[in-house]
Amino acid sequence: MLAAFLVLLAAGCGQGDADAPPDGRDQDLSPVPGGTAVVAIPADPGVLNPLLYNSSLAGMIFAEMHDGLAEMAEDLSWEPRIATGWEVAPDGLRVTYHLRPWVWSDGVPLTAHDVVTSFKLFKDPRVASPRRGFYRDVLAARAPDDSTVIYTLARPVADPVQRTWHQILPAHVVGDLDPAAVATWPFNDHPLSSGEFLLVSRAYNSELVLERNPFYPGPPALLARVVFRVIPETGSRLMALEAGEVDLVDHILPADAGRLEADGSVRVVATGGRRFYYLQWNLANPRLADAQTRRALSLAIDRRGMIETLLAGYGTPAASPIPPAVWNHDAELPADPHDPTRARKLLAEAGWRDTDGDGVLERGGLDLAFEILTRQGDPVREDGAVMLKKAFAAVGARVRIRALELASGLELLRSGRFDAYFGLLNANLYGDPSGYVHSGATAEFNMGHYANARVDSLLEAALGIADRSAALPVWYRLQETLAVDPPSAYLFYPDNLVGVSRRLRNVRPHLLSPINNMNQWWIAPQDRKYRSGS
């Protein structure tokens, strides 16, 4: 296996060894441009068109190719990027951005026309972007000239920059394409870049290669090249990291962290709680349509036991889709306890009975039986699904597990062909779970067709309060409502551990992204293993 990885690495980077590995010396060297880093990822990220992508991997990689008008800094404040700045109208109904000179990776100028064209595509029902609902409060965008964009809002909002932020696509490439045919656009495989890196090659289910963007108007990236290598198995990713074949692996299991650090060639960095594991219910399944059944199944789950077994204790039981890293997380709301006795009582009250003595409850001629869909290659989900199956069996539910690779699983999820989905979500940092729980978000990420009029009303109210302190009680009521009528069983907020090769310098994994400052990474000349053409 090690030999196979070395062959793949040489083929991907196209070159042989050049220098010795790092020996811990020369820590005070100044950054020297050049060199190649290799990042292991667990699956192919899929389409890189921001109008369409559903995977967090795609979002992570596309972010290194994309600059917005503004960007979120490591302290979670907004800072100008393509825009020199912005103004919010006194009535809160307009946001005006002023663009600095910028270019695409093909040398064509990036102007306000690109921004407006992109926004219209995100809102276009023919595109059916899963992010479309996020812009409900933004009525329109217009460009009075090439360097000015004005967004018109339906009402004042708490964070107008966040509400008007979106990725930008090149109008000269996509402007004349059919929005209804977005799934077949050539751009999906060959995106242009407005950021520090550009995509130069891709082999599906194998690797993506990014190189420094020579047209980038800002400070250039230090690395010449970054290779994203697809290695589905957790153990194989760790083996590649320990062998020096890759330089960064996200989602290190706590049980492996101590061994990696003891080796000396890898450091492990912990980032904050932005992610959560959850079990999304499909309410189109009559077995799961009523809140009492879903609530009972949630009480059957031993969250602390899952955290100890699957994460070696590195996590916190989850109570809502707003995780601890986000400003409006309700820290006082308790996660559902492990209470199988109460779970069985609630199921009985909901009409479930074991009339034939086979250990499986029935109601209305249906067994309490369902399938848990999850993703291959993530031992937390694969092993966790087995724990869930056992927990549900203890209260009278029969469960089947179906583990698929990422693309196949997402296809079933998007099409609604699932009963329950054991997923891992990177929550947005704006504190807005509308895309997961609003009744109008079924074309976004509410794939279980959850609908609750009170949840919709609380979301609308909270998002319309500009003062965060005044909005907090509404956000807390929302989370309490979701606990009583749960669209998902929220399982746990895992601590994220990132393994980084010590030859790779100035790497600062962050809750925004494990590769958040990739443009600032560098490798000393004596530590470089692959020629990168620079």
Image (cartoon, rainbow, N blue to C red):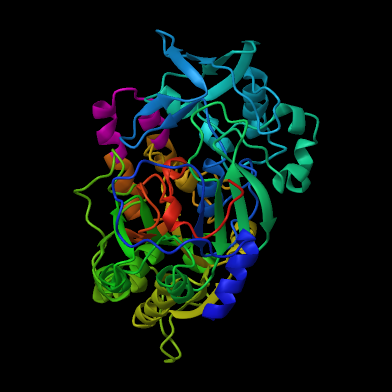
Report if residue 495 is visible in the image: no
Quarter the N terminus occupies: bottom right
What secondary structure prevails in the magenta region? Answer: helix
Up the image or down, 419 lies above or below 29; here it is below
Q: Which residue is depicted at the point 29% across and 74% down?
A: 259
Q: Position of residue 58 (x, y in %)?
A: 56, 50
Q: Looking at this rendering, what residue extends furthest in the bottom direction?
A: 357
- What's drawn in magenta, residue-wise? 459-475
- Residue 67 place in picture, x, y as percent: 53, 32
Residue 472 is one of the magenta-drawn residues: yes
Is residue 406 visible in the rendered image? The answer is yes
Quarter assignment of residue 156: top left
Residue lying at 25% horizontally and 76% vertically, measured from the top left: 341
Residue 449 located left or right of residue 507: right
Near-viewer residue (103 or 427): 103
In the displayed structure, does residue 440 sit left or right of residue 260?
Answer: right
Does residue 237 appear to the left or right of 444 in the view shown?
left
Q: Quadrant of residue 299?
A: bottom left
